Amino acid sequence: MLPQRPDDVRLRARRNPRLIVIGILCACLGSLGMAWAWSTAQDSRTVVVVAHSVSRGQQIGPGDLTTTTLGAGAGLATLSSERADELIGRYALVDMPAGSLVGPDSIGDRVVPQGAAHVGLRLQAGRLPNRPLPSGTPVLLVEVPGPSDQQTAPGIEVEAVVVSAPQALADGQTWVVDVQVDDASAATVAALAAVDRLALVRLADG
């Protein structure tokens, strides 16, 4: 028969050093993770991004922009969401694909170079190519004969550059497009456009 242990004698628990070290490491890693998450939340900022693709020269509308949250350490040129309202009504200075960040040089006022002029044209279907004409496309504006003219040869020709891509009107048969011409030709182009005497021809790129 085994001798009984006295009531005042207690067994001392054996401690595993490996488990103690693992516990300390877990606590440290948890603290570091919480600190990193807190720091990221504190440093994040809300910036302006493009909701859908916008072409260079296009006027910015309320539905063209949205916002997203970005970490402060990203090192990217951005605009704060607080400035989003300032951008409405201005113009895209570069092509901006959907989801891209809006930088300080992405949107601004449309500037007409010295010696040039911007003219708005209203053209019927068949008076401009059916393929896309993005901003910056070189074109030729050609005077076409009127209904009562006997001659069929083209008249005045003016080289131009598309400022904003053509947009179809509600009738689906008429397009409006802004072009840049030299200021000496601006009045002539505007006068011919007013009486529907212009056609737009796309030139070779570059």
Image (spheres, rainbow, N blue to C red):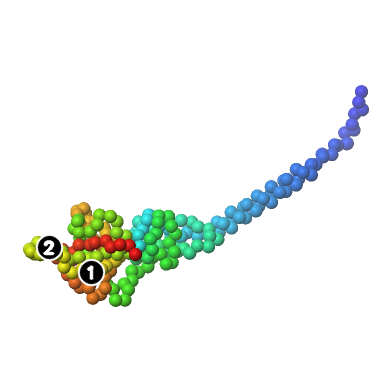
For this rendering, which residue is in front, 131 or 55?
A: 131
Image quarter where the N terminus lies is top right
**Label 2 sits on what residue type?**
Thr
Q: Residues within 10 Å of mark 1 (few under 14, many from 20)?
A: some
Pointer 1 or 2: first along the chain: 2
Q: Which residue is mark 1?
A: 158
Taking the image as drawn, is residue 194 in sight? Answer: no
Residue at horizontal 59 percent and vertical 58 percent from the top: 39
The quadrant of the rendering that contains the C terminus is: bottom left
> What residue is pinned by disc 2?
152
Residue sitting at 90 percent across and 29 percent down?
4
Question: Which residue is most to the top?
Answer: 1
Where does residue 21 sit, x and y in percent of width and height?
75, 47
Q: Is residue 54 visible?
A: yes
Q: Quadrant of residue 137?
A: bottom left
Looking at this view, is 65 or 181 the one in front?
181
User: Where on the picture, by quarter, is residue 62?
Assistant: bottom left
- Residue at image x 19%, y 72%? 188
Quick check: marks 1 and 2 in contact, CB under 8 Å?
no
Q: Where does residue 197 sit, x and y in percent of width and height? A: 15, 64
Image side of residue 14 versus residue 153, left or right = right
The mark closer to the camera, 1 or 2, is 2
- What separation in Å lies between label 1 and label 2 (alpha carbons)? 18 Å
SS category of the residue bearing label 1: strand
Amino acid type, residue under disc 1 in the picture: Val
